[in-house]
Structures are given as C-alpha cells and as structure tokens.
C-alpha cells in the first residue's frame, strides 16, 4: 500500500487529523494472518489483498455499474457463515443480507475484476463474475482434491492471467493453476527450503506485488504449546520465471502475516507477536521473542534491509501488537494492548480483554500517540482494507463470538468516521471490483 503524506500540513493537525492527512492513498489493498485453532486467520480477515491485480486492485469485466465486494463473517453458536454482497459503494449502514450469497467456507481473492473463492471443505476454487445488476454469477470451478491440498488456509499468488500458485504451507510446495481456463497445469514447485521442521505449523501470507515481483510473508508457530519461531521469512516470486522463488528470512520481527509495497517497489513485511506469547509462551530454542513490527526488502534486492526495522513494543511499551497498518515511510497505525493496563492473568483473559487501543506511531522519532476516535475495546479484525483512497479499520464491541458487533471506521483526509457495523461478525473481505 503506497500512501502520500503532506508532512507540513499534518504537523499542524491533531493526531487523528494527522492520520487522516497521511491517508492521501494510492488505492490498494492487502493482508491476513494465518493460523488460529478456529480454522480462520488469527487476525480474522481475508481483507482485499493485492494479489497481483493492477495497482488499484481492481479490474473490469465489461460491467458499467460500480461494484464493491463486501464479505461478512458471521458467528453463531453453531459455527460461522460468510455472506457476500456486491454493492455500488462501501455501505453506510449494516448490510442487508437477504440478497447475499451465503457460504460455509469462503477464502476470497479478487484478480482482474473476477472473484475467486476457495471452499476449504470441498477443496475447490470457484470463479465468479459480477453481473450488471451486481449479482455474483458462477463462472468456472476447479478442484484441488487430485493434488492432495489440505483443508487449511492457503493463498494463491496470481502471476499472470494464465498462471497462479496455491502456496501450500503444509506440504511446502507451489501448485500451479490457470485462472483463465480454471484448470490445474500439472506443475508443482517444491519450496521445502522454507519449512521449519521443529514446529508443526507454518503459514504463507498473501502475495503483494512489489514492482515486477510478488512477495509473500511466512511465519512458523506451535499454537498448542505457544512456541514461536524467532523471526520471519519471505518468498520473492518472479512471475516471468518458472524457477523456485527466492527465500529470505530475518530474526528481528516475528509472526509475519502481511506484505505491502510502496510506489518505489520496496516490499514491507508486517508481523505481530501477541501478548499471549510474551506472557505465557516462548521462542523456539529459548532466548528473546522477536518484535512486532515491520521489515523492508528494497526494490530489486533479495535480502532484508539491515538498516530498517520497526519495533512496535520498543516504541509503545506494549506487551504485544494486534492490527498493524503501514501508512507511509514514517507512520504506522497499530492496535496494541494498552501499555498502561495491568497484564492479563492468563491466556483467556488476554483473548477476552477490552484493553486494546489504537495508536499512531512515528517510526522516525520513535514516538506514539493514542487515536481517540478509534475506541478502546477487544481485538478488532486486523484486515488492511482500502477502497477508493480510504482505509477501513475495525474495532470490536463486546466479547464472545456470538455476543459482539464490529464497527467499521473509514479513515480519509477528511477525518475518521463510523461507516457501518457488522452484527455478530466482522468484515472478512472488502474490495472494489470495478
């Protein structure tokens, strides 16, 4: 996500207005965090990742009416459902789900104006086009059953209109398929060099297009025993090549779940290490846990910048970060556990805590300020949704998967305002299609 900041004007504004000023955004989207024992991402989002589309993250299948995909994940005592609606714009009130496409499994990606949805249970990828009356119309399907893809969360990296890779972090391989013909190509690229055999789980996050290449973040963890690998990795994929991607890693930041890119082609990895790990967990092999924060891979380079790292805990004094949004070269918006709050007594108390606050971090000065317009509360969905130059962030009211609602806030140069709410759920994906 590339963002331009009018620094002279912003210095004269209050914190919230300064944040809004920074969001003179180049439209784009990005992210998600793998893992979690509920089968969805820890951060709870699918989030409109830049998966190889044009710079604005949109496409056009010939339709005339503007179209924004709004996918809600709704929790019930029995489980969860996903409601997919296509609207002319981001809603200003709760979405009427009566006309929504309801699914029980929906990992969503948008590429070239088409919507691709993986059903983990059926092990299929279904393509949808958006009709002129804003209906999702099935437009092709393929099955991954023949290649033994598991039921976990696996993202696709869209290299070209004819080539995409499912990034399988269970078997550590890239499974090639054709987004145009909706067929498997038969090509499988091993990436076992990125596996950490000492830990039972690894996750490859969505790929961000940085210049002429794609960059995907990787982290590794043992969720049952709260053990995190001390560092993060990245795959650097050349869409013009059939060779295996380059793998790089760095020990300074852990839990990398998102990658974003700027206009110069630099890629940034964003990782979080929760307070649950800091209070009750450990790093693999002992020693200190890595930071929550950002790392950079400069354009054209195949290594992390040794002189760039943002340590969110060191700046804020918090025990852990949750949502992290890169605003520009020196500005980060983050949801962290309140540094002034008492430490939770146990893991459940941490998960249920309503002591998470949004802060605006100046990475150059190493300072932070609270963002009062984004309320204290539980851990919000951490998706990095950007539509038409506005960043949409989420806060949670209440606790418990069937006793809360999510508030979606729009952040723009005009300020921060409540856009809409999601009763008993959150926004799983938000992206303009055309």
Image (tube, rainbow, N blue to C red):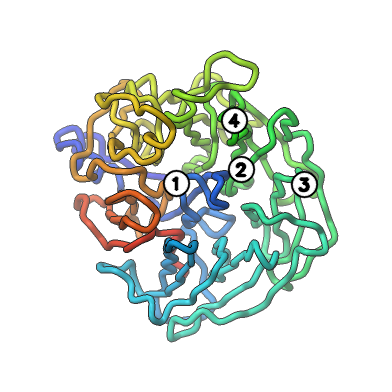
Q: Is 413 above or below relative to 119?
A: above
The residue wearing badge 4 is 225
Secondary structure of residue under mark 2: strand
In percent of the image, x 39 and y 52: which residue is there? 26
Figure check: 55 above or below 203: below
Dividing the picture into quarters, in which one does residue 156 lie?
bottom right
C-alpha separation, residue under disc 2 versus residue under disc 3 = 14 Å
Q: Secondary structure at mark 3?
A: strand
Q: Are marks 4 and 1 in contact (CB under 8 Å)?
A: no
User: Where residue 360 sits in the image (x, y, percent)?
Assistant: 28, 34
Mark carried by residue 216: 2
Pointer 1: residues within 10 angstroms few (<14), some, or many (20+)? many
What's the distance in space between the residues labelled 4 and 1, CA to CA? 34 Å
Please report the residue visible at 36 percent of the width from the left and 47 percent of the height from the top. 380
What is the C-alpha distance between the residues marked 3 and 4?
Answer: 26 Å
Element carrying mark 1: loop
Could you tell which of marks 3 and 4 lies nearer the N-terminus? Answer: 3
Q: Is residue 8 left or right of residue 62?
A: left
Residue 359 as seen in the image, left or right of residue 231: left
Look at the picture and state if 308 lies above or below 402: above
- Identify the mark nearer the N-term, 2 or 4: 2
State yes or no: discs 2 and 3 in contact (Cβ < 8 Å): no
Q: Is residue 266 above or below residue 62?
A: above
Q: Are marks 1 and 3 in contact (CB under 8 Å)?
A: no
At which x and y percent is residue 239?
A: 70, 51
Q: Residue at x 62, y 38 (%)?
A: 218
Q: Quadrant of the C terminus?
A: bottom left
Of callouts 1 and 3, which one flags the residue occurring earlier in the amino acid sequence? 1
Residue at image point 59% right, 35% down: 224
On the image, numbered disc 3 is attached to which residue? 173
- Classify residue 139 by image quadrant: bottom right
């Amino acid at each position: 996500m590339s963002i331009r900041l009018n620094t002279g004007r912003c210095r004269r504004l209050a914190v919230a207005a300064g944040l809004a000023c920074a969001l003179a955004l180049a439209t784009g989207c990005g992210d998600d965090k793998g893992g979690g024992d509920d089968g969805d991402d820890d951060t709870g989002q699918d989030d409109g990742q830049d998966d190889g589309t044009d710079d604005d993250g949109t496409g056009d299948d010939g339709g005339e009416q503007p179209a924004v995909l709004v996918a809600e994940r709704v929790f019930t005592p029995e489980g969860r459902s996903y409601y997919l609606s296509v609207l002319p714009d981001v809603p200003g009130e709760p979405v009427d789900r009566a006309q929504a496409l309801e699914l029980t499994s929906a990992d969503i990606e948008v590429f070239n104006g088409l919507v691709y949805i993986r059903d983990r249970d059926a092990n299929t990828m279904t393509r949808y086009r958006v009709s002129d009356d804003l209906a999702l119309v099935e437009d092709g399907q393929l099955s991954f059953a023949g290649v033994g893809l598991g039921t976990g969360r696996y993202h696709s990296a869209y290299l070209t209109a004819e080539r995409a890779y499912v990034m399988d972090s269970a078997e550590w391989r890239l499974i090639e398929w054709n987004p145009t013909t909706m067929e498997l190509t038969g090509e499988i690229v091993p990436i076992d060099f990125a596996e950490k055999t000492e830990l039972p789980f690894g996750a490859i996050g969505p790929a961000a297009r940085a210049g002429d290449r794609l960059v995907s973040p990787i982290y590794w963890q043992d969720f049952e025993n709260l053990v995190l690998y001390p560092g993060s990795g990245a795959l650097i994929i050349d869409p013009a090549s059939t060779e295996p991607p380059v793998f790089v890693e760095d020990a300074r930041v852990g839990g990398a779940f998102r990658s974003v890119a700027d206009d110069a082609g630099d890629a940034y990895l964003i990782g979080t290490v929760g307070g649950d790990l800091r209070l009750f967990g450990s790093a693999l092999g002992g020693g200190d846990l890595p930071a929550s924060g950002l790392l950079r891979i400069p354009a054209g380079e195949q290594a992390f910048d040794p002189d760039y790292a943002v340590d969110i805990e060191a700046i804020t004094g918090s025990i852990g970060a949750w949502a992290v949004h890169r605003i520009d070269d020196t500005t980060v918006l983050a949801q962290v556990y309140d540094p002034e709050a008492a430490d939770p007594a146990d893991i459940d108390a941490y998960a249920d805590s309503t002591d998470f606050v949004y802060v605006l971090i100046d990475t150059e000065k190493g300072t932070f300020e609270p963002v009062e317009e984004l309320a204290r509360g539980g851990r919000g969905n951490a998706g990095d949704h950007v539509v038409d130059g506005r960043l949409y962030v989420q806060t949670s009211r209440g606790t418990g998967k069937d006793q809360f609602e999510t508030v979606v806030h729009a952040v723009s140069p005009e300020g921060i305002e409540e856009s809409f709410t999601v009763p008993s759920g959150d926004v799983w994906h938000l992206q303009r299609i055309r």
